[in-house]
């Protein structure tokens, strides 16, 4: 196996380890929002009521809530991931010049993630005008 390929594989494995270390606490904080519990702290599963009727407005509101909670999790994790990628790319940039472009794309990706709702709202407003 070429030496460069081994180095890139090690860097990618390290990035995944760093990402999983930062993602765990954020996902653990949000666990209590998804599980309904009774007074004793045991999970409650309602199976006797059947399927409720759902309107289109309820589906749209639920979709907005899901997208909003997903965006909040990503907005908390993205700066940490970007910092890890920038540090690893800076270290790798000493050896490989092509790794230096990774820093630029990591920062651009962070800006797109953090400003995503504003960018989408701007595009929607431009198209509806």
Image: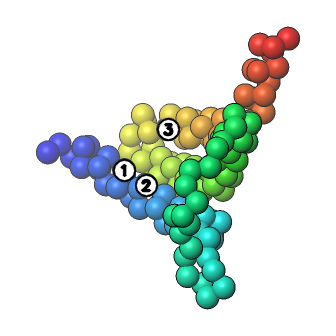
- Image coords of residue 114 (percent x, y): 70, 42
Nearer-the-camera pick, 29 or 91: 29
- Mark closest to the chain's N terminus, 1 or 3: 1
Q: In this rendering, does residue 26 appear at all?
A: no
Q: CA distance from mark 2 to mark 1?
A: 5 Å
- Image coords of residue 126 (percent x, y): 80, 15
Nearer-the-camera pick, 122 or 56: 56
Which quadrant does the C terminus fall into? top right
Mark 2, Cα crowd under 10 Å, few <14 / some 14-19 / many 20+, is some
Q: In this rendering, does residue 98 appear at all?
A: yes
Observer-side mark, 3 or 2, equals 2
Give the number of the disc on residue 66: none
Count of numbered circles in the view: 3
Local SS, label 3? helix
Give the number of the disc on residue 102: 3
Which quadrant does the N terminus fall into? top left
Circles 2 and 1, Cβ within 8 Å, touching? The answer is yes
Q: Which residue is mark 2?
A: 15
Mark 3, Cα crowd under 10 Å, few <14 / some 14-19 / many 20+, is some
Q: Residue furthest bottom?
A: 40
Q: Which residue is mark 1?
A: 12
Locate residue 107 relative to residue 5 in the image: left or right: right
Observer-side mark, 1 or 3, equals 1
For the point 51% across and 64% down, the residue is 47
For the point 72% across and 28% down, the residue is 120
Nearer-the-camera pick, 11 or 111: 111
For the point 55% across and 35% down, the residue is 105
Q: CA distance from mark 3 to mark 2?
A: 13 Å
Query: In this picture, is 35 found above or below 3?
Result: below
């Amino acid at each position: 196996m070429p030496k460069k390929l081994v180095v890139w594989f090690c860097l990618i494995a390290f990035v995944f380890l760093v990402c999983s270390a930062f993602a765990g606490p954020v996902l653990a904080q949000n666990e209590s929002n998804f599980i309904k519990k009774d007074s004793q702290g045991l999970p409650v599963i309602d199976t006797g009521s059947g399927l409720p009727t759902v309107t289109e407005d309820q589906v749209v509101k639920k979709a907005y809530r899901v997208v909003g909670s997903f965006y909040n999790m990503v907005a908390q994790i993205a700066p940490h991931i970007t910092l890890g990628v920038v540090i690893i790319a800076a270290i790798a940039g000493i050896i490989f010049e092509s790794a230096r472009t990774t820093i630029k794309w990591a920062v651009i990706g962070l800006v797109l993630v953090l400003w995503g709702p504003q960018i989408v709202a701007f595009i929607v407003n431009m198209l509806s005008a």
